[in-house]
Image (tube, rainbow, N blue to C red):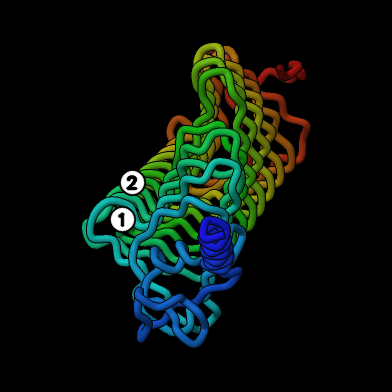
Amino acid sequence: MLYRVLALVFTLILTTLAAADAVATAQRTFVASTGNDANPCSLAQPCRGFARAITQTSPSGEVIVLDSAGYGPVTIAKSVSIIAPAGLHAGVTVLSGDGITVNIPNGVVVLRGLTISGQGGANGINFLAASRLRIENCVISNMGVDGVMFSAAGSELIVTDTIVRDNGGSGIGGDSNTFVVLDHVRSEHNGTNGFYMASFVGGEGNASISDSVFAQNGSNGIWVAATDTSIMFAQIERSVVANNGDDGIRITAQQDAKIGATVTRNAITRNAVNGISVNGPGLAGVTVSENSILHHQDIGVHGNGAGTLVRMNANSMAQNRASPIAEVSATNGAVFYSSGNNVGVIFADVVPALVPLF
């Protein structure tokens, strides 16, 4: 009889503990300047930092910022959204290492309304793994390396309504077979590239860029590349690419790699070398249409390498390299095809025959 009573008590204890574990996390948790990390992160008893709040948040739940404050660096290892409502300053000050690390294979993470500022740190956001990372309405600045670094192969990175500025490396950059979408992004005054992406090792990458600004960066405004035996696709539309320290848009394919790109309806102005530079020795097929390409120290559009084909249509070009005059130039076997309506273009070494893309 005593044994049965003890067994019943033990079962009740286990049931109670299991129930406690089941309610240990919540679908929605909260952080506040007056919070305490010993709290359960509820609305009535918020936590102080993101790291503690995430431990109290259910998978696919939300961490909500209640007021303006700094909430500390964090590593995210579960599907979760961190959300700062409009009008609040949700800061992450990065003294060393990375500000926010995302490392959750097959997870979905959303970062909205955050201000990430480097004070000696490396990357603002380091995207290591997830099915999808969305960065919305954030400001990332003064990092020692990149504003956003991504290496999450096979994932999606979506950045909207975000500013990345004054970082030591690229505003947004990575060597990864990732699907990247940038929409209404401003990448300015970064030490190297405004945006950099390279696919690699037999994989496939894709960059889709629209309605964004890449200006005053130390190297290229936008650089997309295919390396090793990979394939890279890029679509760049309705964006401003201006006053960068090297090329406005650089498109490259290494030996045995392939890249296909469209560059459409952009304002490409006053970059220090070329407006658009397309380079082999791999296969690089690029369509350049309806762009304004002005005031570059070297070539408006430069193609280099026997695997390079550039198709041009309805572009407006002026006051690119003055001597010798060449708004458009092909070197080392590159081929251009003009389908007409290119205003003010002076072609050099143009072959008026359409060559099939890869």
Sooner in the amino-acid sequence: mark 1 or mark 2: 1
164 or 348: nearer the viewer: 164
- Residue 283 lies, in percent from the top left, at 61, 17
Q: Is 340 left, or right, of 89 in this rendering?
A: right
Which three-letter amino acid code belongs to the residue tagged 1? Met
Kindly indicate whether the residue at mark 2 contacts the one at mark 1 (C-beta within 8 angstroms): yes
Q: Is 36 left, or right, of 306 in this rendering?
A: left
Label 1: element kind:
loop
Please tell me how crowded label 2 is: few (under 14), some (14-19), or many (20+) other residues with Cα within 10 Å.
many
User: Which mark, by number, is residue 33?
Assistant: none
Write down the quadrant of residue 5 in the picture. Answer: bottom right
Write down the quadrant of residue 139 in the picture. Answer: bottom left
| Residue at 50% in and 84% down | 87
211 or 118: nearer the viewer: 118
Which three-letter amino acid code belongs to the residue tagged 2? Gly
| Residue at 28% in and 61% down | 94
User: Which mark, by number, is residue 143?
Assistant: 1
User: Which mark, by number, is residue 169?
Assistant: 2
Specify the quadrant that holds the N terminus: bottom right
Specify the quadrant that holds the C terminus: top right
Q: Report if residue 201 is visible in the image.
A: yes
| Residue at 62% in and 36% down | 206
Q: Report if residue 322 is visible in the image.
A: no
